[in-house]
Amino acid sequence: MLAAQSVDRENAGLHSQILSLRRRLASTKDIPESVQAVLEATLPDLIASSASSDSFNDEFLSRHTSSPEHVLAGARGVLEIKRSTDPLPSDTAEAVSSVLDKLVADGVPPHVDALLDAVSLLKEAGASTEQITAFEQKAKGRVPLATVFEPVEEKKKRRDEVMQAFGEEIKA
């Protein structure tokens, strides 16, 4: 906890870890007194005890609309907040997807690794194949030269074209 206090409050990794810790603490019944004392002394410096996790996450996202790393942390935050309900609510994938759509907005610099992480996060949130495909199409629009977001059939077709162009025999 003391180490977390020394990290920049705007750090994307710290943000999602705070929300994860808060969720886990809320579901933990038996916390030793010594640990509880440390938490009570340090946690308010990281997140106001009166602030809801939703408002904490929304404020973080509003401060970091153009940073792929921070948008991803905000989307992870949404998933952590939704995880406090078991089972995951049916709107989890949609809530995560709406945050991740900011990654494919014009004001955010395209970042292939962040877009790939976003696809993984959608899967973790229980998104449907259609939701994932729709996001991948938006991502492809942002990074048109990245073949990673192409459907498998297109990748095979491209591979075959390249192999034929170089006179190589195509092996199935």
Image (cartoon, rainbow, N blue to C red):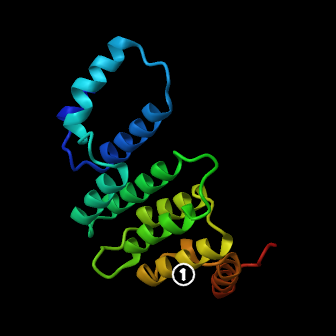
Rendered location of residue 107, percent (x, y)? 27, 78
Q: Is residue 96 left or right of residue 155?
A: left
Q: Residue at x 26, y 70 (%)?
A: 66
Regarding residue 2, the answer to whether it shows in the image is no
Q: Nearer the viewer, residue 112 or 21?
A: 21
Identified at 28% across, 20% down, the residue is 38
Check the image and report above or below for 4 versus 57: above
Q: Residue at x 22, y 24 (%)?
A: 41
Q: Badge 1: few (under 14), some or many (20 or more) residues near its Cα, within 10 Å?
A: some
Report the residue marked by disc 1: 137
Q: Give the image location of residue 103, x and y in percent.
A: 38, 71
Q: Quadrant of the N terminus?
A: top left
Rendering quarter of residue 169: bottom right
Quadrant of residue 153 in the image? bottom right
Q: Position of residue 77 (x, y in %)?
A: 41, 52
- Quarter of the image where one finds residue 161: bottom right
Residue 150 is left or right of residue 114, and the answer is: right
Front-lying residue, 118 or 127: 127
Residue 10 visible in the shown view: yes
Q: Report the side of 47 relative to 23 (left or right).
A: left
Q: Position of residue 8 (x, y in %)?
A: 18, 43
Quadrant of the frame with the C terminus = bottom right
Q: Secondary structure at mark 1?
A: helix
Query: Mark 1 belongs to which amino acid?
Result: Gln
